[in-house]
Image (cartoon, rainbow, N blue to C red):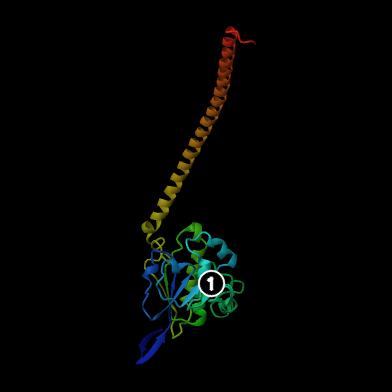
C-alpha cells in the first residue's frame, strides 16, 4: 500500500494493478513499484514469467481448462497444480490445484445490489474474466485500480465483453474509496479499453472516418465476394467440362487400346497363330 500525506498525517492507500494478456500494454504496468498489488490472470505468467504477483485469477470451468490445454504451447494444468505463493481465484476450490481458492461470488453479488447500484436480477453481469478482479477489489475496499494489458478490441471475440468491462469501470469510479473520496480507475495509455475517436457530433470527422473506411471495406468485401463466387462458378464449369473430356478421353483411349489388341491379334493370325 502507498503512504500519502494528508493534513500532516500519513495515509495508507491501497492500489491494485490488474494486468491482462494484451501485448500492447501488459508490460507498461508499474512492475517493481511496491505501492501496488499486482493481480494477473489465466496464462499471463508465460509471457511475464519474472514478475511479482499477489493474486491470480482463472475463472473458467475445469472442463474448459482441460479442453483448451491441448491448444497451448505450455501445460497450464500442470502450472495450476503447482504451489504458488499467492492465491489463485477460481470458480471453486479444486483439490488438485493446491493454490486455488473459491471466488466469493455470492458475497460480491450481494454487494452489487446492496451497495453498488445494481438492480435485483443484474447479478450475472460478469461477461469477462477481468470483471471478477475489479469487483473483488471493490468488495474488499480499494483506493485505486490500475488496468493494463486489456484491449477487447476484436468484435469477433470481445464484442459482448468490452461494454461489460467498461460498465464495471464506471461502477468502480462511483464507489467510495477506502480512504475517502471515490475509487480512481486508471487505464493504461496503450490500452484500447475506454478509448474512442472523439466526441460524437463534435468531432465528426475524427469520429466518422473509421466508420466510413469500415463501410468502404465492407462494400469492397461484397464486391470481392461476388468476384470470388463468379470465379468459383467458372472453375466449377471448367471442372465439369474437364470431367466430360476425361470421360471422352477414357472412351477414346479404351477404343484405341481395343484396336491395338485386335491389330495384334490379326497380325498373329497372319503368321499362323490359331484363332
Q: Is residue 181 above or below residue 127?
A: below
Q: Position of residue 182 (x, y in %)?
A: 44, 80
Foreground pick, 97 / 224: 97
Q: Position of residue 253 (x, y in %)?
A: 55, 21
Residue at horizontal 38 percent and vertical 81 percent from the top: 35
Q: Is residue 229 above or below residue 256?
A: below
**Is any part of residue 109 visible from this angle?**
yes
Residue positioned most to the bottom: 8
Foreground pick, 111 / 74: 74
The C terminus sits in image quarter: top right
The N terminus sits in image quarter: bottom left
The image quadrant of residue 106 is bottom right
The residue identified by callout 1 is 81
Q: Count of labels shown? A: 1
Foreground pick, 199 / 184: 184
Q: Is residue 242 above or below residue 53?
A: above
Q: Is residue 104 left or right of residue 15?
A: right
SS for dot 1: helix
Q: Position of residue 72 (x, y in %)?
A: 49, 61
Residue at horizontal 48 percent and vertical 42 percent from the top: 225
Q: Is residue 159 left or right of residue 5?
A: right
Residue at horizontal 54 percent and vertical 70 percent from the top: 59
**Is any part of residue 128 visible from this angle?**
no
Amino acid at each position: 500500500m502507498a503512504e500519502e500525506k494528508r493534513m500532516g498525517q500519513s495515509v495508507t492507500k491501497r492500489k491494485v494493478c490488474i494486468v491482462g494478456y494484451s501485448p500492447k500494454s501488459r508490460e507498461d504496468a508499474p512492475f517493481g513499484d511496491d505501492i501496488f498489488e499486482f493481480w494477473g490472470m489465466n496464462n499471463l505468467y508465460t509471457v511475464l514469467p519474472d514478475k511479482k504477483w499477489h493474486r491470480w485469477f482463472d475463472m473458467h470451468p475445469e472442463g474448459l481448462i482441460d479442453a483448451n490445454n491441448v491448444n497451448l504451447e505450455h501445460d497450464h494444468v500442470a502450472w495450476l497444480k503447482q504451489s504458488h505463493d499467492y492465491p489463485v481465484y477460481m470458480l471453486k476450490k479444486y483439490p488438485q490445484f493446491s493454490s486455488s481458492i473459491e471466488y466469493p461470488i455470492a458475497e460480491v453479488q450481494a454487494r452489487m445490489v446492496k451497495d453498488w447500484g445494481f438492480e435485483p436480477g443484474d447479478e450475472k453481469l460478469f461477461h469477462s474474466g477481468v470483471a471478477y478482479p475489479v469487483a473483488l477489489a471493490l468488495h474488499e475496499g480499494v483506493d485505486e485500480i490500475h488496468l493494463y494489458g486489456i484491449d477487447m478490441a476484436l468484435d469477433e471475440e470481445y464484442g459482448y465483453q468490452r461494454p461489460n468491462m467498461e460498465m464495471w469501470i464506471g461502477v468502480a469510479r462511483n464507489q467510495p474509496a477506502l480512504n475517502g473520496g471515490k475509487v480512481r480507475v486508471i487505464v493504461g495509455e496503450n490500452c484500447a479499453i475506454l478509448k474512442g475517436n472523439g466526441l460524437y457530433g463534435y468531432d465528426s470527422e475524427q469520429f466518422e472516418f473509421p466508420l466510413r473506411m469500415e463501410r468502404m471495406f465492407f462494400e469492397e468485401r461484397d464486391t470481392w465476394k461476388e468476384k470470388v463466387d463468379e470465379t468459383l462458378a467458372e472453375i466449377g464449369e471448367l471442372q465439369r467440362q474437364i470431367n466430360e473430356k476425361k470421360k471422352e478421353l477414357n472412351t477414346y483411349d479404351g477404343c484405341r487400346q481395343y484396336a491395338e489388341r485386335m491389330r495384334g491379334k490379326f497380325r498373329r493370325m497372319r503368321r499362323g497363330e490359331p484363332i
